[in-house]
Image (cartoon, rainbow, N blue to C red):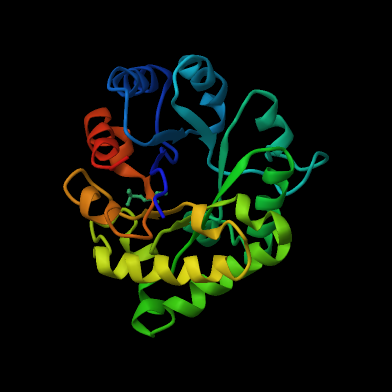
Amino acid sequence: MSRRKLVVGNWKMHGSRSVNAALLDGIVQARPFGCDVAVCVPFPFLSETAVTLSGSDLRWGAQDVSSHEQGAFTGEVSAGMLAEFGCRYAIVGHSERRALHAESDQLVADKAKAALGRGVTPIVCVGETLAQREAGETEAVVKRQLSAVIHTLAHCAGEIVVAYEPVWAIGTGLTATPEQAQAVHALLRAQLRAAAARADEMKILYGGSVKPDNAATLFSQPDIDGGLIGGASLKAADFVAICRASPA
Ligand code: 13P
């Protein structure tokens, strides 16, 4: 089955108004791409990004979302707030949030549910640490992480985007080989098939040191439907090259 590729930039905590303007302009000028393209930016830049990208086919999203609708949750941002001005995606369960903010599988699942409830597509990140891979636990870890989301979303599980991001490959320059990544993507696809009627249409992105020179081979794997790009999404030329590496 051929799925249209999706390439998403995760800017993490980088950027400034002037830097963003130049970066977004570089991406906008390079259109059209043969794949769908989105940027997930820090909260303060969301509305300006929405304005900059309006009228283009580039999509934008947030890097997190609260599991709560509203209330006394200082510092949190709700899915309703994101949806109100057209946010398309929210990354949930990034390994940096799981590790630095002790986010549990269930909290990640609740965030995905809150996003979907407001029409924001969650990009659910799963991935094992180096120690877990070396202990032969990769399959068990990613299945456990995804299973919490599938369980919580029930019949809506088919609406999410999944991102496989091996923690040992994030920001390290160590990329999973296309075969290593494909093997995990195939496992995740099988797990989705058991839970969602439209599993074959769902996108499973790979993230972890994707660069212009390794993107094409990763994206040519049968179950890799695009990428979630960190460092290389901060340079327009690199991000554009990765988007162009993605076959339609
Ligand atoms: P790098 O591309 O910098 O390895 O980051 C990957 C990532 O964490 C994207 O969410």
187 up-or-down from 73: above or below: below
| Picture residue at 83% right of the left edge, 40% below the top | 71
Image-quadrant location for residue 185: bottom left
Give the camera-side residue of 124 and 15: 124
| Picture residue at 72% right of the left edge, 61% below the top | 154
| Picture residue at 50% right of the left edge, 79% below the top | 140
Q: Is residue 36 left or right of residue 112?
A: left
Q: Residue furthest bottom?
A: 135
Q: Residue furthest left?
A: 213
Residue 29, given in percent of the width and then of the height, sits at 30, 17
Give the camera-side residue of 35 and 40: 35
Residue 217, given in percent of the width and then of the height, sits at 21, 54
Q: Residue furthest front?
A: 1
Give the camera-side residue of 115 and 167: 115
| Picture residue at 57% right of the left edge, 74% below the top | 144
Residue 124, given in percent of the width and then of the height, sits at 54, 54
Quadrant into which the C terminus falls: top left
Residue 242, given in percent of the width and then of the height, sits at 26, 40
223 up-or-down from 57: above or below: below
64 up-or-down from 173: above or below: above
